[in-house]
Image (tube, rainbow, N blue to C red):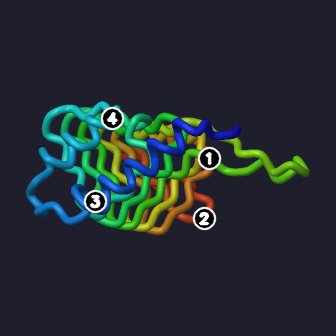
Amino acid sequence: MTYTFSNKFTRVLWLVVYVFLFRFSPRPWHWWRSFLLRCFGARIDQGCHIYGAARIWAPWNLVCYSGACVADQAEIYNPVKVTLGEGAVISQGAFLCGASHDYADPAFPIVEAPITVGKRAWIAARAIVLMGVNVGEGSVIGAGSVVTNDVPPRTVCAGNPARVVKTIT
């Protein structure tokens, strides 16, 4: 995958907007940050809470359903679509990584796969969700966990790599 000039230019423009208008906006101004993200093509439903210190690489690849939350210092690296379901929570310092490199290829090309976080799922602080992962509805990813595979609905997963440790009834 190579990025077009247009993609690179738009990311630079987004970075300028992020630094000067998004990052230091007053904490309760979720509406303002949602507006700025929408200006760059994000789909942000009503009631979403995107905090000022959240980092979003490509707003045009972000979908947040009603009530989704992205906390301070959470990072969404999304060269492909990342979808946050209704009421999904991405806690402080969590990292959603939608791309990597093909280490088996000498050219080391970028590989990408979308991430979906289900309705009312919670990605706890400093957890990492890797490309291509679907986190099931109502699931909890424990703090500091590394999620490399899909997570079934209504489960608690923890560890590195994350494993199911409990089913939520």
Which quadrant would residue 163 be assigned to in this image?
A: bottom right
C-alpha span from label 3 to label 4: 17 Å
Label whose residue precedes the other's in the sequence (4 or 1): 4
Type of residue at label 4? Answer: Ala
Name which residue lies at 39% across and 45% down. Answer: 139
- Closest to the observer, 37 or 84: 37
Mark 3: secondary structure: loop
Residue to which mark 1 is pinned: 99
Image quarter hosting the C terminus:
top left
Is residue 105 shown left or right of residue 163? right
Q: What is the x, y in percent for residue 133? A: 56, 41
Q: What is the x, y in percent for residue 5? A: 58, 39
Is residue 165 shown left or right of residue 38? right
C-alpha span from label 2 to label 4: 31 Å
Residue to which mark 2 is pinned: 160
Name which residue lies at 33% across and 37% down. Answer: 40
Label whose residue precedes the other's in the sequence (2 or 3): 3
Q: Nearer the viewer, mark 2 or mark 3?
A: 3
- Closest to the observer, 93 or 15: 15
Type of residue at label 2? Answer: Asn
Mark 2: secondary structure: loop
C-alpha span from label 3 to label 1: 21 Å
Label 2 near label 1: C-beta < 8 Å? no
